[in-house]
Image: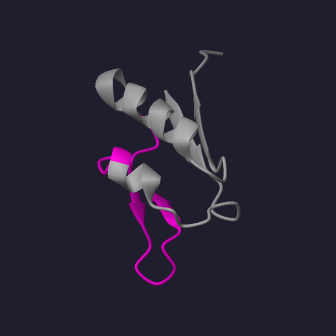
Amino acid sequence: MRVTVDQQRCVSSGLCALAVGEVFDQGEQDGVVELLRPEVSGELAERAQRAARVCPARAIAVQEEVDA
């Protein structure tokens, strides 16, 4: 699965980093989401999807990758 973030929408709540610290972090200066792993699978994919659902700004997207 592919994870993307919209840093412009992020409100720095930190819920994503708390939910999946292996995939998301927060910037030290402004707390804006930082994507650590754009490709995830298995348990990390499930946790990233949960983080996307709880994001108050809807700044996270997790999508199935489709082979061309």
Q: Image quadrant of residue 19?
A: top left
Image point 37% across, 25% down: which residue? Answer: 41
Image point 66% across, 16% down: which residue? Answer: 68
Residue 18 on image: x %, y %: 34, 53
Q: Residue furthest bottom?
A: 29
Image point 31% across, 51% down: which residue? Answer: 21
Q: Is residue 41 above or below residue 61?
A: above
Q: Is residue 39 above or below residue 35?
A: above
Image point 46% across, 43% down: which residue? Answer: 38
Residue 6 on image: x %, y %: 65, 55
Q: Is residue 45 left or right of residue 67?
A: left
Q: Image quadrant of residue 25?
A: bottom left
- Which residues lie in the magenta part? 19-39
The colour scheme applied to this rendered structure is one colour
Q: Is residue 46 above or below residue 38?
A: above
Residue 20 among magenta residues: yes
Q: Is residue 42 above or below residue 11?
A: above
Q: Residue furthest top?
A: 67
The count of marks equals 0
Residue 53 on image: x %, y %: 56, 36
Residue 47 among magenta residues: no
Q: Main secondary structure of the magenta part?
A: loop
